[in-house]
Image (spheres, helix red, strand yellow):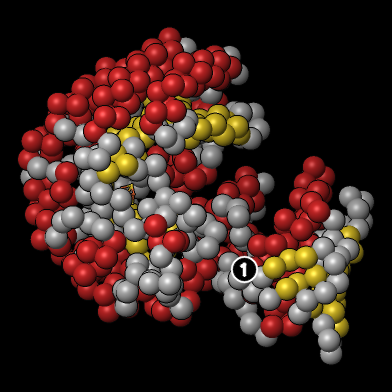
Amino acid sequence: MIIGLSNIAFEYRGTIQDIIWLFYPGAELVAEDRGDFSLHLNLGNLEELFAEAQLFAKDVSLAQREEGQPITPEESPNELKRLARMAVYKLLVSYSRTNPSPWGIMTGIRPTKVVHRLLDFGWDIELVKNYLQNNYALRQDKANLITSVAGIQRPFLLSKEQTKKLIAIYIGIPFCPSRCLYCSFPSYPIKRHRDMVDPFLKALLKEIQVIGEAIKSQGLLVQSIYLGGGTPTSLNYDKFQLLLQAIQQYLKTNHTLEFTVEGGRPDTLNDDVFALLADSGVNRLSINPQSMNQKTLDIIGRAHTVEDIYDSFESARKYSFPTLNMDLIIGLPGETVEDVARTMNSVLMLKPENITVHALALKRASILKQRLAEFPLLQAEEAVAMWQETARGAAVLGQQPYYMYRQKQMVGNLENIGYALPGHECIYNIQMIEERQTIIGLGVGAGSKWVDPETFTLVNEYNAKDPRQYVERLDQYIARKLQHIGELANA
Ligand code: SF4
């Protein structure tokens, strides 16, 4: 499909492109009046805020006008963009006679961040819900969901004063036993890349030591640590022990409320590893089956069985980790609603304190993207039915949704959502999504978010995704982080 955008300024094309693709995924957008239909956009200015979208097809022309007011004067430029997106969205709903997303025009933003901003202005929940439905075309159930999630998160959000002191640490380990079909993370099958392990670990231990010492000397406090990747437990026992010792020595203190480890794959876990994790103060452990169906595990490239997941989970319980998490994915190749129901029945037996449900997102870096012809993606209705199965299971366990985010190209236009028993919410996940806390990323592919405590605006920086580049550029990454740490301490 081809859609003409002849009179739409370049900076507005980006903002309406996501909206057009909700209705016509992958449509080619051209800067002239041709194709299946053309869209025009007439915009007001910062004093007079309006957007009028027009659609011209062979036998029909339609128009939609939106007018609005910013909540504060500084928000006028963003308000103009929102009006443009709303005008195009409503126009395409009329033209296509479909309403493709329960999230309306909330694409490419973190929905709960919008809610927190409105709550900061003192708005009450009902007003926020109405605003979301009227100004973002959110369906009522999604407005209810994000306001309820935001309500659970409020006690965890930092004040400006706390943002000057409390930080989080993310550590990225880029190795796994094998590469999953859908994976887009920096992850190298460890047996094939043994030569990378020692140089990487040496560099990481140096980064942990230098940054840990700077954090302490500047009086910053580490609230949470998240050891992910990759699968950190794919390192052999001795190397993993070295890593955990360094974390304890340089990063973890009495102020550290949470220490999460992604034990992702059951084939990397055993009693020795569990004992080491427990002794190192890990209080949240993730064992991530994604599915409890053997045929799916085989298709996605896991080298373990469903039985292994049960065994790992039951062994982990012996070490009394306060929170066990399970990650699941909706929309895995070949899965049906019945498969997801079967997975949820197994999860109900294992009773984790957290369940994190991801809707499959097709990523450029994944093998799945290259093999799409073999594994067609789900229809939206099926994805929604699967989502309902997982929500039902979480409710049976007494868990509530406590964090969520959306990505592009998710099956069924759904969301990723974390459920937790009250008191077992993952602090790191909340802070990472709501972006009011500085997160320092160490290791391969690790992102740092440097938050300005006055404005909650942030600067994102990343370590290289390739372990060799990470090792080469380590001193550069450390120097940049030391500078940011100094700035934060003096804020
Ligand atoms: S376990 Fe996670 S990080 Fe490792 S290959 Fe699979 S999806 Fe990627």
Residue 484 x %, y %: 55, 20
Q: Quadrant of the C terminus?
A: top right
Q: Residues within 10 Å of mark 1 (few under 14, many from 20)?
A: few
Residue 2 x %, y %: 73, 73
Choose top left, top right, bottom left or bottom right for residue 483: top right
The answer to which of 27 and 82 lies nearer the viewer is: 27
Q: Is residue 223 visible?
A: no
Q: Quadrant of the N terminus?
A: bottom right
Residue 129 x %, y %: 61, 64
Task: Name the residue: 66% across, 33% down.
Answer: 455
Q: Which residue is mark 1?
A: 26
Task: Name the residue: 79% across, 62% down.
Answer: 84
Task: Name the residue: 84% across, 90% down.
Answer: 59
**271 is higher (above) or lower (below) than 111:** above
The amino acid beneath tag 1 is Gly
Choose top left, top right, bottom left or bottom right for residue 170: top left
User: Outermost residue toward the top?
Assistant: 217
**356 is higher (above) or lower (below) than 138:** above
Q: Specify whether 76 is left or right of 331.
A: right
Task: Name the residue: 77% across, 46% down.
Answer: 75
The answer to which of 294 and 430 lies nearer the viewer is: 294
Q: Specify whether 383 is left or right of 346.
A: right
Name the secondary structure under disc 1: loop
